[in-house]
Image (cartoon, helix red, strand yellow):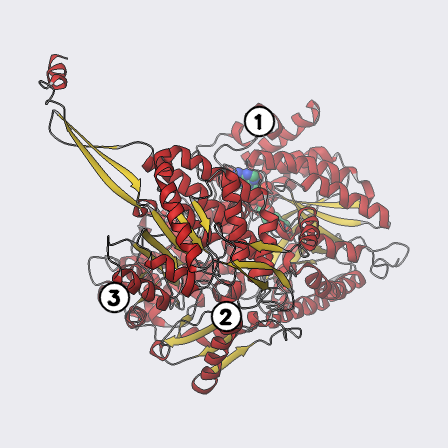
């Protein structure tokens, strides 16, 4: 921007800020000023608003109210705002907050305390007051419950020269039925709008569409299918919009859906019927929203302009900064991506916005840009940049009202034509508002947001109108140092494992091509010592497909292995923690270098999907690096111990000898690597027995460890039958310990074998089964529950130790919750794991299939069937058990773990949470437990009383991350310590203490020296 334009922009921004600050805030602006999210009250208000109105039962509503209102001091907020709406909401909360004061005291019996407190005023009064407060809040965000109501409300604004873009609330449909419902609401809204639209798309009300509302699997994994399903619906809607000459904007959502948004956009752009000339000109109201915070924003603007030119269309494009910033940052960290898809400094987004604005304006008549912002500085800069070229501003309903009023006044004062302003107006029921509401509260509550800063008296006028370009120019580094790259999440100690951005077609498509080539590779697994006996390994997806050959070790070969390992262990131990750490880290690097071979094997030998294969390799790499860092921390130098003067006390950790590591097929690489690398880190030699079903992956893992420089005798592969290899290993006199993951029955057998041995008693570390539950109360968000239940129960075909088996749902919400889960199940695809679109692959073998089928047969007779998917058509040669969902009466009906995609549901009464926890404890398993509730006291109760190793709140209960969520259960679920946790590696060590009397050589010199000093 040249100096003149910048000066003009700054002067206008100053005038706008002064004008807004002179006015009293109203609507949501006023609300956000009173309840900023940095305060307890703001958070309590947001939590209440998010949850209260969906809770049907009095019991849970009262608990939520007590939970959120007892703490903050609402009286401070009363009268702080001049807005009647804010005060009405505050008053209701103050009233209830006072009434239930003390009810949240955890030392008291909180349920009875709540009962006493609420009793004074009467529960219904309290509940009604708070519900009213939340409805007041909701009304300020929603424009109308129906399109009729909304159009009526829009009338006075339209008379004042404003226009509207209606957003039919609802996004991220979880079921086909929801998607159909949302599509219908768009259809009827457009029919209704068409009747009002007489002035062309620039002036008439129009519509904004979220594509996630139109398909339950609108995601890159289902790109082809989702786009094919969504295009006809969007086309139908767009045709209505074109006919009425109103605008039709496809909203921008998460970054990993951008490719899909563009596919849909491009398909419509090429559709001549939509743009057939009418009265001399063709429709110009079609377009997309572009997010400036995305690093791809500027090229995207240029691409859109070019696409418009290439197809000879005129488009209307909305530029926003972007509403999912926090989600994007977390998602990239979780996925271990090389970098973030979004910019990490707010000011960088402001600069990107200006660059994009310029690109859109420069596209000339091809693009009619709509600039959506509530930032006075951005607005002034865009206006200055435009230099009279046509565009419009857009704001959200309830926000930025004063700002745009001020702009209109200013434009009038300086004799400028008034810039058109459009209001984005959400239409729908409160129930569908939640996701939108929370995004708005978060976005505007952030202290970097302009809405927040303009309200803050501490922020000067100069700061508010600072030029972002100059500000960013002066900043070093450009990248926000507070947001480290996903790779550096675990600090200097350990590099995070690398994920793969499968949403990027430039990454995904070549990878899929290379995996295709790897499908013809034939693999071999041989025992490190001896020849073994050959057996073909086939794919669980199709038993006709041979993946390779395993040579299974005999008892004599296993014996030779143990002896060789025993001899090698002394030098390995003597290497020390630092040297062993370096070798393990080298192995981790090699795993990453050979990741694609490992993915291929996970898919072909273990029947995993690519998504699961990527997670598997990442977890294995994390184990190697974490245990390396533990070796460095605990095994590099002696630990000095306290004692009297004249004495030196030290503790040293050493390997115990030869460990047998016996691993399962369900994480053939990750658990195999964890069980092998932890004892290695501690200075032990290891004989690693892979599962009978997955020896090839184990063989590649051991080969990479050898390549990394870990001596062949120190880590040895012993493929073979449990009775031969496992039996010989566990009974071997030279064995120093066993680490095992698998069934409780096998663990018992190993335990008995170990008990019968003469000689030293050795450690046995076992990770076994679970009867994992998730508790869902009526404050939980059904869409979130559905997402988390589906992944917890069915991802990896339910073959995870942590997988959800039994869902407890509060009875008041059970019917709709169960229906939504069943609906989402219908959208799952069962089949070939090498197809990216597959959600559920095969089970591991025929024995597993039979056991699961037997259980389903039992369920058919003893439980209520809710949903049962069909196995794929081409399943005849594979082992498939399609996901099943049954309702049972009580947990006691299940007497063992069913290791597959079978979900059971049990209803419970809202006031019987204690009984649910007791029942779960009574299984004596204690692996994972999920809870979905918005009530902190409920969470505290479950956390305190449930005897489980891993407790997950408001998320899925699978996918424990090394070091972040050390994994392992108690009771029948395992011995501990937790894998990937701080106490794990030391469990493989012996401890030796040396005590030296330093005075023995003739006096306590160090004491004397210290005194002298
Ligand atoms: C009419 C309208 C339609 C909209 N449609 C969409 C849509 O389709 N898709 C969508 O995603 N959003 C949409 N939004 C929401 C929009 O993204 C936000 O309202 C907007 O980001 C707020 O920007 P601002 O200029 O008003 O405020 P500002 O306070 O100037 O900017 C806040 C924004 O800066 C960005 N930001 C904050 N912190 C950082 C950081 N550390 N690093 C980088 N960037 C940061 C975020 O985008 C944040 O929202 C729409 C908004 C309006 C008004």
Label 3: which residue? 111
Q: Quadrant of the C terminus?
A: top left
Quarter of the rendered structure image containing ligand 1: top right
Question: Outermost residue toward the right?
Answer: 280
- Secondary element under disc 3, as helix, strand or loop, is helix
From the viewer's perspective, is residue 629 above or below residue 57?
above
Left or right of 837 on screen, residue 894? left
Mark sitting earlier along the chain (1/2): 1
Q: Quadrant of the N terminus?
A: top right
Q: Residue at x 49, y 45 (%)?
A: 621
Question: Outermost residue toward the bottom?
Answer: 861
In this view of the protein, which residue sits in the foreground, 267 or 674? 674
Q: Position of residue 109 (x, y in %)?
A: 21, 63
Q: Nearer the viewer, mark 1 or mark 2?
A: 2
Q: CA distance from mark 2 to mark 3?
A: 37 Å
User: Which labelled disc corresponds to residue 58?
Assistant: none
Label 1: which residue? 471
In this view of the protein, which residue sits in the foreground, 943 or 979? 979
Quarter of the image for residue 238 reads: bottom right
Q: Nearer the viewer, mark 2 or mark 3?
A: 2
């Amino acid at each position: 921007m040249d100096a003149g334009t910048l000066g003009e922009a700054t002067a206008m921004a100053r005038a706008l800020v002064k004008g807004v600050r002179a006015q009293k805030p109203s609507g949501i602006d006023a609300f956000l000023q009173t309840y900023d999210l940095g305060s307890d009250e703001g958070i309590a208000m947001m939590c209440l608003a998010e949850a209260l109105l969906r809770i049907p039962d009095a019991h849970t509503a009262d608990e939520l109210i007590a939970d959120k209102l007892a703490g903050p001091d609402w009286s401070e907020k009363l009268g702080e705002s001049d807005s009647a709406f804010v005060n009405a909401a505050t008053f209701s909360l103050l009233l209830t907050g006072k009434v239930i004061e003390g009810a949240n005291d955890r030392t008291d019996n909180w349920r009875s305390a709540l009962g006493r407190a609420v009793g004074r005023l009467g529960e219904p009064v309290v509940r009604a007051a708070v519900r009213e407060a939340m409805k007041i809040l909701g009304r300020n965000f929603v424009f109308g419950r129906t399109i009729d109501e909304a159009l009526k409300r829009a009338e006075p604004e339209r008379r004042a020269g404003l226009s509207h873009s209606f957003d039919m609330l609802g996004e991220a449909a979880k079921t086909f039925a929801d998607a159909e419902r949302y599509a219908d609401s768009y259809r009827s809204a457009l029919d209704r709008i068409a009747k009002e639209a007489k002035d062309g798309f620039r002036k008439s009300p129009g519509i904004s569409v979220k594509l996630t509302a139109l398909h339950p699997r609108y995601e890159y994994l289902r790109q082809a299918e989702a786009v094919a399903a969504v295009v006809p619906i969007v086309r139908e809607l767009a045709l209505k919009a074109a006919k009425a000459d109103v605008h039709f904007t496809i909203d921008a959502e998460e970054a990993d859906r951008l490719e899909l948004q563009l596919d849909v956009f491009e398909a419509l752009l090429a559709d001549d019927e939509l743009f057939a000339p009418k009265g001399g000109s063709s429709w110009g109201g079609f377009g997309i929203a572009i997010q400036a915070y995305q690093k791809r924003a500027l090229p995207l603007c240029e691409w859109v302009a070019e696409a418009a030119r290439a197809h000879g269309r005129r488009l209307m494009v909305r530029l926003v900064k972007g509403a999912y910033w926090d989600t994007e940052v977390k998602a990239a960290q979780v996925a271990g991506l090389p970098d973030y898809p979004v910019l990490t400094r707010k000011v960088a987004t402001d600069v990107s916005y200006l660059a994009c604005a310029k690109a859109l304006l420069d596209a000339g008549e091809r693009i009619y840009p709509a600039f959506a912002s509530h930032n006075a500085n951005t607005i002034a800069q865009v206006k200055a940049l435009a230099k009279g070229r046509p565009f419009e501003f857009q704001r959200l309903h309830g926000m930025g009202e004063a700002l745009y009023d001020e702009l209109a006044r200013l434009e009038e004062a300086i004799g400028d034509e008034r810039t058109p302003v459009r209001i984005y107006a959400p239409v729908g029921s409160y129930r569908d508002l939640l996701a939108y509401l929370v995004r708005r509260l978060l976005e505007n509550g952030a202290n970097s947001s302009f809405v927040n800063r303009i309200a803050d008296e501490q922020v000067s006028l100069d700061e508010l109108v600072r030029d972002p370009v100059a500000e960013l120019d002066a900043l070093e580094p450009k990248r926000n140092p507070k947001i480290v790259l996903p790779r550096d999440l675990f600090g200097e100690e350990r590099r995070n494992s690398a994920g793969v951005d499968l949403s990027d077609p430039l990454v995904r498509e070549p990878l899929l091509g290379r995996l295709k080539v790897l499908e013809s590779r034939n693999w071999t697994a041989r025992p490190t010592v001896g020849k073994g006996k050959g057996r073909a390994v086939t794919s669980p997806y199709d038993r006709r497909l041979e993946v390779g050959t395993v040579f299974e070790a005999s008892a004599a070969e296993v014996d030779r292995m143990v002896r060789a390992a025993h001899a090698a262990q002394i030098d390995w131990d003597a290497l020390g923690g630092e040297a062993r750490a370096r070798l393990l880290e080298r192995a981790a690097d090699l795993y990453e270098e050979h990741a694609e071979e490992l993915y291929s094997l996970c898919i072909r030998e273990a029947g995993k999907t690519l998504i699961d294969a990527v997670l598997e390799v990442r977890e294995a790499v994390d184990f190697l690096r974490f245990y390396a860092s533990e070796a460095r921390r605990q095994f590099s130098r002696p630990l000095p111990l306290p004692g009297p003067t004249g004495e030196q006390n030290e503790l040293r950790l050493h390997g115990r000898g030869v460990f047998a590591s016996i691993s399962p097929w369900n994480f053939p690489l990750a658990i195999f690597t964890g069980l092998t690398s932890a004892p290695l880190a501690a200075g032990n030699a290891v004989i690693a027995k892979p599962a009978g079903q997955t020896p090839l992956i184990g063989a590649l893992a051991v080969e990479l460890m050898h390549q990394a420089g870990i001596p062949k005798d120190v880590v040895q592969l012993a493929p073979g039958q449990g009775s031969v290899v496992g039996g010989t290993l566990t009974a071997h006199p030279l064995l120093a310990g066993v680490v095992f993951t698998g069934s409780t029955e096998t663990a018992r057998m190993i335990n008995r074998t170990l008990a019968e041995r003469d000689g030293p008693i050795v450690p046995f570390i076992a990770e076994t089964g679970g009867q994992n539950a998730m508790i869902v109360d009526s404050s939980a968000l059904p869409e979130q529950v559905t997402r988390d239940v589906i992944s917890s129960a069915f991802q990896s075909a339910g073959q995870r130790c942590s997988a959800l088996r039994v869902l407890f749902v509060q009875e008041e919400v059970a019917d709709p919750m169960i229906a939504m889960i069943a609906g989402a199940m219908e959208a799952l695809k069962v089949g070939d794991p090498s197809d990216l679109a597959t959600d559920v692959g095969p089970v591991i073998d025929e024995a597993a299939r039979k056991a699961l089928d037997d259980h389903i047969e039992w369920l058919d007779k003893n439980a209520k069937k809710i949903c049962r998917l069909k196995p794929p058509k081409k399943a005849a040669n594979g082992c498939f058990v399609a996901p099943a969902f049954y309702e049972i009466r009580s947990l006691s009906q299940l007497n063992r773990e069913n290791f597959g995609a079978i979900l059971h549901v049990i209803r419970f009464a809202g006031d019987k949470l204690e009984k649910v926890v007791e029942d779960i404890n009574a299984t004596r398993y204690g692996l994972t437990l999920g809870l979905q509730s918005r009530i902190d006291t409920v969470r505290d109760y479950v956390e305190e009383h449930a005897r489980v190793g891993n407790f997950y709140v408001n998320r899925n209960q699978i996918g424990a991350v090394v070091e972040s969520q050390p994994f392992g259960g108690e009771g029948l679920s395992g011995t501990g310590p937790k894998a990937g946790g701080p106490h794990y590696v030391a469990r493989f060590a012996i401890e030796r203490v040396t005590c030296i009397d330093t005075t023995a050589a003739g006096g306590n010199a160090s004491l004397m020296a210290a005194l002298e000093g």
